[in-house]
Amino acid sequence: MSDEVATCTSYPKRYFNASQTWDHWNPLTATDIHALRTESGFEGQKIYFFGYHPIRYTRVVGILVDIELRGRYTILTIDDSSGACIDVKIEARRVTRGDNAECPSNTTVDNVDIHVIIGSGPTIHLHRKPLEIGSVLKVKGTISAFRGVRQIELKRLFTVDDTNAEARAWAETAKWKRDVLAEDWILTRQQQHEIDERCRQEERKAFELSKKRREWHNKYGAAKRTYDEKREARRREKEMRYNAGALKGSHLIPAPWD
């Protein structure tokens, strides 16, 4: 197999694990996120592209400039001074009636709570402490779109407490774009062949496991069903005797006064 380079617009999804960007919180700016490409075949999968690189997770650092309540979602607007703002969507945790389980927060992010006071709008609490407009935040999440405009669906939230930390975050973004995103992600034919072979091996393993499960079910499934049916029949018979108030042999037990 030669080391010839295979060029294409984007690779099939099975190759994405080979990209540095696939399982990484990619440091981007709001402007970068709005400029990410979409590709046919990946609709509805929250997969975007920076050049060749597949992007599904991102990290943005900026100033909190607005908080808005939209139904069961709370929207934070972040301004990172890149020339555009980005909305960050926080989803309220769904709690079903009768569910008494304790939840770490009232949102899907464990350390983030939304408090709503009538007449004053929502407030965001991070680790039970309120966030003020003007706070510098580090936001991590997936990318989606609402009415054609990109947004971040929140997964992690942190405060950036000083200008040194903010400067380091900007430096990380610049370095990631320079060292990773600015370089074309290109797989050689050999690399594609190796990934294809691993995929085939995983498919064979999955097929063999499924086959063994079917064989076990065919061999032992009928016997297990028979055993379960007999046990259920005994349980029903015992229940009927209890309900009738006449346990087998109870007439042989002498009363104390006999």
Image: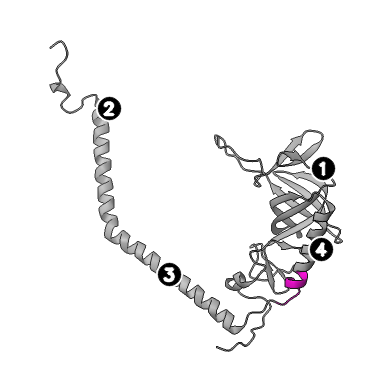
Q: Which residue is mark 2?
A: 243
Dot 2: what SS?
helix
- Please, what secondary structure does the residue beneath circle 4 have? helix
Verify CB contact (< 8 Å) between mark 3 and mark 1: no
The label nearer to you, 1 versus 4, is: 1
The circle on residue 132 is 1
Q: Is residue 114 above or below residue 85?
A: above
Residue 75 part of the magenta segment = no
Number of labelled discs?
Answer: 4
Residue 166 screen position, x and y as percent: 81, 55
Amino acid at dot 3? Lys
Residue in view at x 71 percent, y 63 percent: 26
Mark 1: amino acid:
Glu
Image: magenta residue range: 177-184
Residue 51 x %, y %: 73, 73
Q: Residues within 10 Å of mark 1 (few under 14, many from 20)?
A: some
User: Which quadrant of the rendered structure holds the N terminus?
Assistant: bottom right
Q: Amino acid at mark 2?
A: Asn
Q: Residues within 10 Å of mark 3 (few under 14, many from 20)?
A: few
- Of residues 97 and 135, the one drawn nearer to the viewer in this rendering: 135
Name the dominant secondary structure of the magenta segment: helix
Q: First in sequence, mark 4 or 2: give its number.
A: 4
| Residue under label 3 | 205
Of the image marks 1 and 4, the number of the one nearer the N terminus: 4
| Residue 38, quarter of picture | bottom right
- Which of the two discs, 3 and 4, labels the residue nearer the N terminus? 4
From the image, tell me which residue sits under label 4.
Answer: 31
Residue 238 is marked as none
Q: CA distance from mark 1 to mark 2?
A: 65 Å
